[in-house]
Amino acid sequence: MSRVSIQSQDFDPAAELVALEASGGGGVASFTGIVRGQGGLVALELEHYPAMTAMQVERIVEQALARWPLLGVRVIHRFGRLEPGERIVFVGAASRHRRAALEACAFLIDWLKSEAPFWKKEHFADTALWVEARAEDEAKAQDWAVKPPR
Amino acid sequence: MLTIVYFAWVREIIGHDEERIERPAPGTTIRTVIEGLAAQGGGHAQAFADMDRLRAALDQRFVPLESMIGQAKELAIFPPVTGG
């Protein structure tokens, strides 16, 4: 199974967790991102940079593997049009101990927010707006105190 | 020739997702290339009005706007990313 998938179709978090549990570690941590339906949001449109995205997410995974003793890592990021309640992103990490798995998960999702070439557009009933990057997301990624994968 | 690709609102304002320009000298910075495109007016001028809102990648790697084009084949210009 590949470590990184960039896809339009949905995924099954349970199946992903089972696969990570089989990697022989003592613990598996994961994060699943869901489209929030607040403020009359009709759909979220995710654009990405096809020639770069998978390669860049692999670089982020390599950073996680260099920092924590992980036995398995899985990242799935969807693109295209998603409605409230739909899954957007999955990050999972398996390790012998909980701290490495939990920290790697937090690192991966923080870095996906500020270091992967995705752009979100919010569609409402009568308008559509590109989501502005938040300075605090950038700050969270910097908090990991390593240079971004460049 | 240098291929330039655009994403998100930069793409929408310019009106297309890709174009090719005469290859700049290797020492030319991305910022200078963007200034040259902005001078064409129209959507380019509008999309590139505020450089602080722009980010770039050269051959699929994020780089600062001060980076030189060098031998890169593809320049990407886009707003700060909002994935995750």
Image: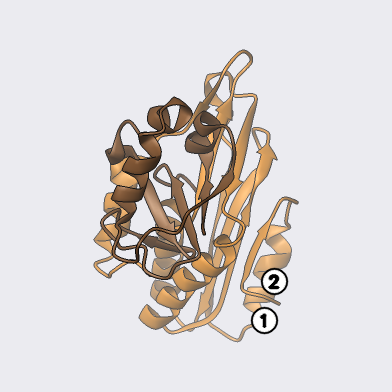
Chain colours: A orange, B brown
Relative to the observer, which residue lies in front, A42 or B69? Answer: B69
Q: Residue at x 64, y 48 (%)?
A: A79
Which amino acid is tagged 2?
Val
Vertical side of A121 occupied by A21: above or below: below
Q: Is residue A56 left or right of residue B64?
A: right
> Does the CB distance between marks 1 and 2 fall below 8 Å?
yes
- Residues indicated by labels 1 and 2 sit on the same polypeptide chain: yes
Residue B70 showing in the rendered view: yes
Vertical arrangement, residue B77 with respect to residue A45, above or below: below
Residue type at the position of mark 1: Ala
Q: SS at mark 2?
A: helix
Q: How far across and how far down the image is residue A147, in percent?
A: 28, 69
Secondary structure under tag 1 reads: loop
| Mark 1: few/some/many CA within 10 Å (<14, 14-19, 20+) | few
Where is residue A47? Give x, y as percent: 59, 44
Disc 1 marks which residue? A22
Q: Vertical placement of A31 versus A104: above or below?
A: above
Question: Residue at coordinates 30% horizontally, 59% vertically from top-left?
Answer: B28
